[in-house]
Amino acid sequence: MKVKFVDLHAMHAPLMDEFRRVFERVVENSSFILGAEVSRFEEAFAKYLGADHCIAVTNGTVALELALLAMGVGPGDEVITVPNTFIATCEAVSAVGARPVFVDVDAISYNMDPTLVERAITPRTKVLLPVHLYGQTADMDPLLEIASRHGIQVLEDACQAHGAEYKGRKAGTMGVAGCFSFYPGKNLGALGEGGGVVTSDAQLAARMRLLRDHGSLRKYEHTVPGYNFRLEGLQGGILAVKLPHLDGWNDRRRVAAEHYDNLLAGNGIIPPVELPYAHHIYHLYVIQADDREQLRKDLNAAGVETGLHYPGPLHLQEAYKSLGYTKGDFPVCERLADRILSLPMFPDITREQVEYVVSVVKESQCRTEPARQVFAK
């Protein structure tokens, strides 16, 4: 059996007629950049999350950069975040001229450890940037309390958390703003690049709309030097088609995750844990294994695609060598990087596919367990 890591075709096939109608409207109206299709999506996504504003942009990296710019972050400022995230989180910080400051993560949630944040705060700290990794939110109440006490703004990286909740509140709505990626493989993905920022701060939203489109609210009238961060009309229309299906797709991911959990129990594998405060939407289903590389090879040989999210912590990447961190500075993150493996996860994954994946995992574990016992002796 072949099991894809993500099967987008299965999700898109029932929507093809609606996609064609979007394409026809965009071509007919020549609304290729921003326009009515994007505005409709912005309104719908903000309403879905319970926010007042959504500013649709080119991609998730740009969403983070735009939010930081609008929040006044720049050279000399520091932004506290985590090293176990896609580099885009830190690239956005670097792009505005600020310095990323890392803190380690919780060993169970894989998200920012609130107990470590205060020791990282300095007079230059401007923003706290938690990442809602894999589809589960960080523990936001203590993070928001710390930030409030120190006069720091909170920006949520919700690029993997479309529809995830923290104590009933949607990811992306608890800080000053929340950033989303609509990369095709995300729980809510475009048919190309896309991103967005949500906020209930009207002034911040107005600032982001201005910066998004060359510092202009009216053609050829430029209030400030801005950027070309505009979303294409076609992608806005596609996202509007897909948004009503998001909760159903997330529910199906949760069912698949529960099936994985039940089948993997007691097999030497550490499955993901849904925390009591969370509504996990399983953008990724990430396990831990003692011999991750051998397990990945066995799965690949059996036709099962897997992923690594992420094998190289950012503090050990050449790109951020200048920050001065060394191996051992973030032990939880480093240990996870050697052990994590993302198994296939998408709304249309079948029970049979999950069972096949787990059967390969169990067979691999049985082969490697005797070797570990011999080594232990």
Image (spheres, rainbow, N blue to C red):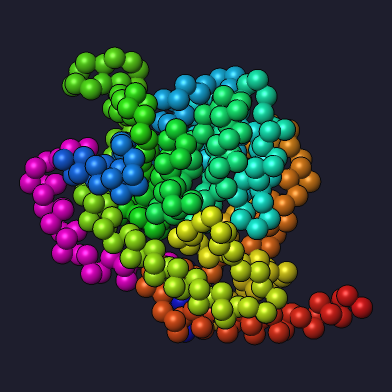
User: Front-most of 332 and 192?
Assistant: 332
The image shows residue 136 at horizontal and vertical percentages of: 51, 55
> Going by the image, does 36 lie left or right of 307?
left
The image shows residue 45 at horizontal and vertical percentages of: 29, 46
User: Front-most of 111 and 312?
Assistant: 111
Query: Picture quarter containing residue 292?
Result: bottom right
Q: Residue at image x 30%, y 21%?
A: 215
The image shows residue 137 at horizontal and vertical percentages of: 52, 51
| Dominant secondary structure, magenta | helix
Question: Magenta segment: does it hold 13?
Answer: yes
Q: Residue at image x 43%, y 48%?
A: 169
Report the number of discs: 0
- Residue that protrudes farthest toward the right in the picture: 377
- Residue that protrudes farthest toward the left in the picture: 28
Query: Picture quarter containing residue 232?
Result: top left
The image shows residue 361 at horizontal and vertical percentages of: 61, 79
- Quarter that holds the C terminus: bottom right
Question: Magenta segment: does it hold 30?
Answer: yes
User: Front-most of 356 and 138?
Assistant: 138
Query: Picture quarter containing residue 337?
Result: bottom right
User: Is residue 300 visible to us here?
Assistant: no
Is 185 above or below relative to 54? below
Q: Residue at image x 69%, y 42%?
A: 115
Q: Residue at image x 44%, y 81%?
A: 351
Is 29 above or below relative to 335? above
Is 277 above or below relative to 328? below
User: Is residue 265 visible to us here?
Assistant: yes
- Magenta highlight range: 6-35
